[in-house]
Every structure is written in structure tokens, then in C-alpha cells.
Image (tube, rainbow, N blue to C red):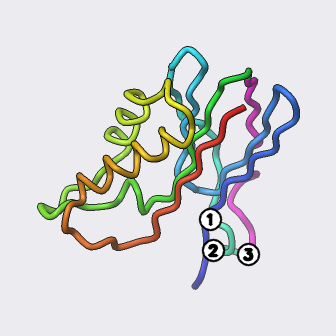
Amino acid sequence: GQYLTAFYLRIDKNKAQYCNATHPEPIVVSPDGKVARLKSNGFYLGMLAETPFEFETGNLEVSKGTKIVIYTDGITEARNPAGEQYGIARLTSTIEGNADKPVADLRAAILSNLAAFAATAPAEDDLTLLVLEF
């Protein structure tokens, strides 16, 4: 009855390989500020003895200045006092608006925007956020 999601990222110079086990899709910010989500298939770890399909490994070419935002669903599923979810669109918009900032400032901007959105609503899940830059 227990399972988890996971995201695996292996970095080697200007290339990255990744595999996603139903974890929220990380967001990549290219040096020119374009934002995209890392798509791949996967299945929960531990839910079934045999997965219904093979896990897919994705490849990503990266250059200096590329950023990757990895987060848990506690961020996108956070609610405000009215019950609305923060959502992927709001997260993406916040990243786009702060894409040119250093990773610490980008991370702070996301957390600040999330806190302002959630206001007094209690957190219902863990909030984990990692911002990497090549």
C-alpha cells in the first residue's frame, strides 16, 4: 500500500540524462529564458510488483546558465484560503518572471510567491524545491 514518486538526474558535462517515476515534471530554463518541462514516462515506485511499461530515459543538452527547477507536488497542490491550488501555470509564470536571476534568488522568488498565494492556509503536504544551474 505504500509507494513513492522519484526523479533521477545524471549530469555529465553538457549533457544530462533523467528518468521520472511519476514525479512532477521538472522545469528547465534555458540561458535565453525559455521555459520547458522535462517530459518522460514513468510509474510509481513500489505500487506494483511489476511496472506496466519500461521506464524511459530522457536526454537533455545543457549549456552554461541552464537552470533546472525540481519540486514536489506539495508546491503545485498548495492551496490558498479559498481552496484554489497554486498549480503548474502559476509556478511556471513565477519562474518565467525570474528566469534571469541567480538560482538562490529564483528559489526565493518561488517560495515568496507561494507563501503570498497560500497566505494563512495550512500546508497539506511537504514542500521541497531544488534549483540547479549548469
Q: Residue at x 36, y 36 (%)?
A: 94
Closer to the eye: label 3 or 1? 1
Which residue bears the numbered disc 2? 47
Going by the picture, which residue comes out furthest to the bottom?
1
Residues packed near mark 1 inside 10 Å, few (<14), some (14 to 19) or many (20 plus): some
Q: Secondary structure at mark 2?
A: loop
Q: Position of residue 127 (x, y in %)?
A: 46, 64
**Quadrant housing residue 79:** bottom left
Q: Position of residue 39 (x, y in %)?
A: 60, 37
Q: Position of residue 10 (x, y in %)?
A: 81, 44
**Quick check: 48 left or right of 24?**
right
Residue type for callout 1: Tyr
**Quick check: 64 left or right of 107?**
right
Q: Residue at x 45, y 59 (%)?
A: 73
**Distance from label 3 to label 1 (Cα)?**
11 Å
Residue type for callout 3: Ala
Which residue bears the numbered disc 3? 49
